[in-house]
Structures are given as C-alpha cells and as structure tokens.
Amino acid sequence: MRAVTLLLCLLATSVSAQEVDEASGLIKADGWQLVRIHCGGCHSHKLVTGQRADRQTWLAIIRWMQATQNLWQFDDATEKGILDYLAANYAPQSDRRRAPIPPQLMPPRPAVDSGD
Ligand code: HEC
C-alpha cells in the first residue's frame, strides 16, 4: 500500500512539472517545436502563451490570422500537431480570469432600469 502511494506521488509530480522553453516561454510538450517555428514570426510567443482557448477557438484564431494577417496555410499534419499542442497546453482554466457573465444571468440594474 505504501509503495502504491509513493508511486502515485511520483506520478503526480512528474505530470505537474512542466518544462518551459526559456527563449519562447512555450511549455515543452508534444508539438511545441511546431508552435515555436510557426507562431513566433510575426508576434511574440507570449501572445500565444497568454491565450487560453479550446481547440475550436484556437482553430478560429488561426483561421482569422490566415484570412486577415497573412498567416500561411498548414498541411493537415502540421495543423493537427499545432492544435493538439495548443488545446492540451493552453486550454481554458478555472483558476484564471473568469469568463464574462452571460447577460441573462446579470442582476437587474435599478438605477438604469427604474425609468426615473
Ligand atoms: C503571418 C503572421 C502571423 C503568424 C505567423 C502568426 N500570427 Fe498570430 N497574430 C498575427 C497578428 C498580426 C495578430 C494581431 C496582433 C495584435 O493584435 O497585436 C495575431 C494575433 C494572435 C493572437 C491574439 C488573438 C486575439 O484575439 O487577441 C493569438 C492568440 C495568436 N496570434 C496566436 C498565433 C498562433 C497560435 C500562431 C501559430 C499557429 C500564430 N499566431 C502565428 C499574425 C501572425
């Protein structure tokens, strides 16, 4: 039992210990070199590492840059590698700034809505 606990502790430590590339600030995980190569030419990698998004939103950001900012097209494997990496390492997180509250969940605004 003690051995199992120890093993779990070791596993937890190795999973949470992220290695970060000093030059770019990118988390060194599968696919990070693709993002280093393709995503730092026009702006700092910090624009990438500061962003959190799900896979679909990352794709939308890429499509937006391709449509309006001269970002080049990727072959399928490259695009998949980039998206896998971004979705895995820069996903939305609950401990960051919260998402905006949807308007229908906001309290009424008496001062504005009372009409006087
Ligand atoms: C060809 C140039 C170019 C390349 C290469 C490029 N981007 Fe961008 N990207 C831009 C420009 C221009 C902006 C807008 C910058 C600004 O608003 O200051 C931008 C903005 C962004 C933003 C901020 C979007 C927002 O809503 O504020 C993110 C995130 C981003 N890029 C991620 C990436 C990722 C990931 C890659 C690699 C797949 C990448 N960029 C590669 C040109 C590029």
Image: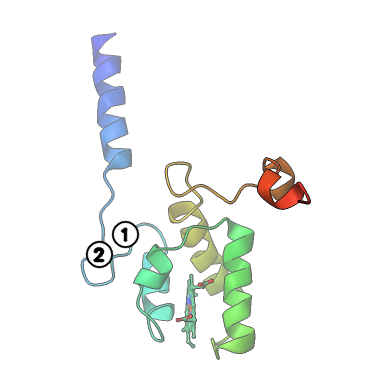
Tag 2, which secondary structure?
loop
Q: Nearer the viewer, residue 83 or 24?
A: 24
Using the rendered image of the protein, determine whether residue 9 is visible from the camera's viewpoint: yes
Note whether ligand 1 is within 8 Å of mark 2: no
x 78%, y 51%: residue? 115
Q: Nearer the viewer, residue 61 or 116?
A: 116
Q: Is residue 68 left or right of residue 42?
A: right
Q: Is residue 71 left or right of residue 18?
A: right
Q: Name the residue under label 1.
A: 28
Q: Nearer the viewer, residue 116 or 107?
A: 116
Q: In which quarter of the image is residue 65?
A: bottom right
Amino acid on which the number 2 mark rests in the picture: Asp
Using the rendered image of the protein, determine whether residue 109 is visible from the camera's viewpoint: no
Mark 1 or mark 2: name the one nearer the start of the chain.
2
The outermost residue toward the right is 115
Tag 1, which secondary structure?
loop
The outermost residue toward the front is 116
x 58%, y 72%: residue? 61
Q: How crowded is mark 2: few (under 14 residues within 10 Å), some or many (20 or more)?
A: some
Q: In this view, does 23 lie to the left or right of 12?
A: left
x 30%, y 16%: residue? 4
Against 65, residue 20 (above or below) is above
User: Is mark 1 in CB contact (under 8 Å) with mark 2?
Assistant: yes
Q: How crowded is mark 1: few (under 14 residues within 10 Å), some or many (20 or more)?
A: some
Amino acid on which the number 1 mark rests in the picture: Lys
The outermost residue toward the bottom is 70
- Image coordinates for residue 1, horizontal then vertical, percent: 29, 8
Q: In which quarter of the image is residue 43?
A: bottom left
Q: Quadrant of residue 54?
A: bottom right
- Image coordinates for residue 56, horizontal then vertical, percent: 64, 61
Q: Name the residue under label 2.
A: 21
